[in-house]
Amino acid sequence: MNEHSRILEREKVDIAETLREADLRLPAVLPRESYPIEPVTPDARQQTRAIGQRATRADGRLHGLGQTKYIDDLSFPGMLYARIKRAGIASARIKRIDTSAAEAMPGVMAVLTGKEIPVNSFGPSFQDQPVLVDDLVFHAGDGVAAVAAVTEQIANEALEKIVVEYEPLPAVFDPIEAMRDDAHKVHAPNSNIYATKVIRKGDVDKGFAESDHIFEGRFSTQMIEHVSLEPHAAIADWDANGRLTAYATIGRITLARSDMARTLKLPMSRIRIVGTVVGGNFGGKNEITQEPALALLSKKAGRPVKGVFTRGEEFTSTTTRHPIVMDYKTGVTKNGRILARQIRLVLDGGAYCSWSETTLGKACILSPGPYKIDNVLAEAFVVYTNKTMTGAMRGFGAPQVCFAYESHMDDIATALKMDPLEIRLLNAFDEGSPSPTGQVLHSVVVKETLRKAADRFGWEPRS
Amino acid sequence: MTDVTLTVNGQIRSASVPPETTLLQLLREHFNLTGAKLGCDVGDCGACTVIVDGQAVNSCLMLAGQAHGREVLTVEGLATRDRLHPIQQCFENSGALQCGFCGPGALMSAKALLDENLNPTTQQIRDALAGNLCRCTGYTKMIEAVQDAARLLRDEPRLKLTHA
Amino acid sequence: MKKRGRGIACMWYPIGFTVSANPSAATVKVNEDGTATVLTGTVETGQGSLTVLAQIAAEALGIATDDVHVVSADTDTTPMDTGAIASRTTYVTGNAIWLAAEAAKAILFETAAPMLGVKVSQLEAKDRKIQVKNFPQRNVSIGEVAYRSQVVLGHPAIGSASWNPPTVAMDPETGQGKPFATYVYATQIAEVDVDDETGEVEVLRIAAAHDCGTAINPMLVEGQVEGGISMGLGMALQEEMLFDANGRLINPNLTNYIMPTSLDMPELHVDIVQGFDPTGPFGAKGVGEPTAVPTAAAILNAIHDAVGVRVTALPATAEKVLAAIKAKRAAEQPKQIPA
């Protein structure tokens, strides 16, 4: 009997049983194109209707047992500990670095400065960030030298023994001030305005002329740190064939490998990046930080080198959320329909570009809000300042502009004596509405979310 | 060097360490118990929380020498070979751990609470977890998990007698 | 005295990179017993992406989440991935995994069709079986097919694929274009108590309604909403990196950088607004970042509703709120005209 007939035999035996089993977990009438949220089923991971299950996480089991190995939990024979000396001054030229006293310390196996880095620049848009500063310091958290030692304590002590002479330079800290022609140029000779974005749809002047009321407002947000509970950490090691392995808390290992290839001048086939489980990212671990320095320390010392940022370095020397100053001007009819909106965003771009171009673009595109507006002009600028570099952080500018456009919307509602829910339902996108960039939107459910949240909250209009 | 002998998860352990060694370093580097984490090293974040003589403490603030002769319980001491501790089971079922880095510390704070009080109010649970910073979860599912664990433990008296 | 207020904020947020390519590649291998291994270059950063990706592969192959093992985050052994950024993992990496699973499944169907005496196009994978559509009693276990495919016929069921969201570059003068393949939407409504003598704000409850397309794992979606709200709350009321006049940080530590603890979180009511995006894997979009977007706005609008002051610079610390309340009271005093 062949496979085919064996199957046919079996199917004759218990048709009813087979049918019953197959349809057991499906609702009676399945909507044609939707996956219902499954009720909590025991052993959700065992259900063969996998979509919609409240499946527990396999890695969650290990987390609860304390068995998950994060980078700092890993240890290799002969491993050294690295620390990085931070500039502590916001803008300066390095006149002299003397690492001899540190190198002479027993237990210090390697010391590294910026000029030893083959290509000392990286960045996802502009490669304006050095691994270790070799000439100019752009913010107080810049790394100026690195050491690897047999214990972390010796590494800390060695940092103190590194002598750096700085020539202080002018600095600028406020982005609006930094936009002026006479402001100190952070990355001279380039302008401090390092990227701009414009969205222009319809004709805002015409829209304002047709409006019954015009409202204006300025909103601003602060610099915020990701505060992942796990600090940035990495371990670098080489094999006898000159192949580098780096374990790193990076959420983008393909990009990390590419950045390591660039900064170390290595072919990609000689680099392996391993991410284990990252203890929180939120955008702060999407690019290399200390990894090339650790790799070079490891090469010099001939031993694996681990570097873990202190909590202080998490604040001074890793990317942060862009502070944004946002100016809004909106023209509405007396019934609250938005006819025109004009926006100006100035992003504090910190010392290096990092993910600022992406943040600028997203903030600009999202800044009019989820509303049908025929006439839009949004202009956005990102500006260098001598502060901690601003980069990717959960939302890429969206939380900032949402704070602005939704506060602004409520101000309009108050002035027109309209219910805040009603004015939003009046203006919000529908299926097929065009976005500010002219894109026809699909799967639009903003009004559904407004109604659902209002229902859940118990939002009643006030008389 | 300081000689320390203490009971960790029911086992007597000893080490000879430099006097400035913290309990956290002793556990992680000398006893290979890497569950407790280094999040800030100054007692702000709670990722290093373990239970010493029944009290939840930040092990980064305690010197190894101060733990001499004491009983320490870490996250590695919660489960048995055959089953998870109810607190671990409930955290898993509720999805209360995301990146998991704050998890061991939060679990020990929860254990310390439930060892004292098997009927905690929501506010008491919040208070017990107040020293454990978490950036991923917003604490909501952790609080639910502790409530579930309390319920389970109330119904299973024999489980109250876990070691330490 | 405590004054109560309520505030709404709604938002939209895109999935994936702005115009530029952000592909993900994946490989799905069906083992000889019908379980599967997925290779993906993405990195688990705590959000539970590996579980969601396992669910997507399981659904495509008709097996259970537990039958799928996901290998990730190693540039030597896993295919390229643009990474855990821009809320793109479920959508972009998910699509790549779905396509790879379909490719592996196609090999299984080629083997199963003659076993079941039907055409390939008549087959579906469900409940760990490969069966005939509309006639499920004619079926064979996926393990039998996988074994036969690899061991007997020499055709292992391995599928590889990559996917990149389709976009249109934005015009440099007008910004017109299609920068993202899809967007998600959400509303959060906050209720607060503001103490008008101290300026302290207590957030009592937040109702959050979030769209994520199909919710592949509702428990993990809720986790993202709750975590995002905690970040939004910190941004609204507490967090700020402070610099001195020389550009050095005053508070580079967790003692003086205030962020939410378990004591700060309000009661949360989370609703997933069910949607279906045909461009996403099984209709899914994404949810990682959107959850942190509207919270600050909702809380600040609630403060405005409670005490009639508009704080326009975040964070709305007690000092700022109190100063605004006092300024408002002073402005409302009837002007004293000297005699």
Image: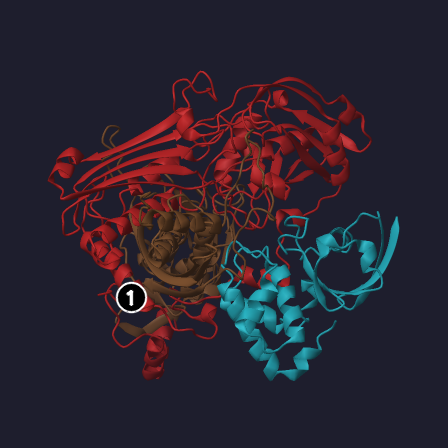
Colour scheme in use: by chain
Number of numbered discs overlaid on the protein picture: 1
**For residue A71, above or below residue A343:** below
Q: Quadrant of the C terminus of chain A?
A: bottom left
Q: Colour of chain B?
A: cyan
Return the residue at label 1. Answer: A459
Name the spot of residue B10 as percent of width and height, x first. 78, 69
- Which quadrant of the figure has residue C233? bottom left
Chain identifier of the residue bearing label 1 in the image: A
Name the spot of residue A436 as percent of width and height, x first. 23, 41
Q: Tell which chain the image draws in brown.
A: C
* Mark 1 neighbour density, 10 Å: few (under 14) some (14–19) many (20 or more): some
Q: Regarding mark 1 in the picture, which secondary structure is present there? A: loop
Residue in the foreground of this view, choosing between A172 and C144: A172
Name the spot of residue B63 as percent of width and height, x first. 79, 53
Q: Quadrant of the N terminus of chain A?
A: bottom left
Residue in the foreground of this view, choosing between A342 and A216: A216
Name the spot of residue C81 as percent of width and height, x first. 44, 43
- Which quadrant of the figure has residue A51? bottom left
Residue in the foreground of this view, choosing between B24 and A16: B24
Question: Can residue A420 be spotted in the picture?
Answer: yes
Residue at 14%, 38% (x, y): give it. A207
Q: Tell which chain the image draws in red.
A: A
Residue in the foreground of this view, choosing between C119 and A2: C119
**For residue C157, above or below residue A42:** above
- Which quadrant of the figure has residue A112? top right
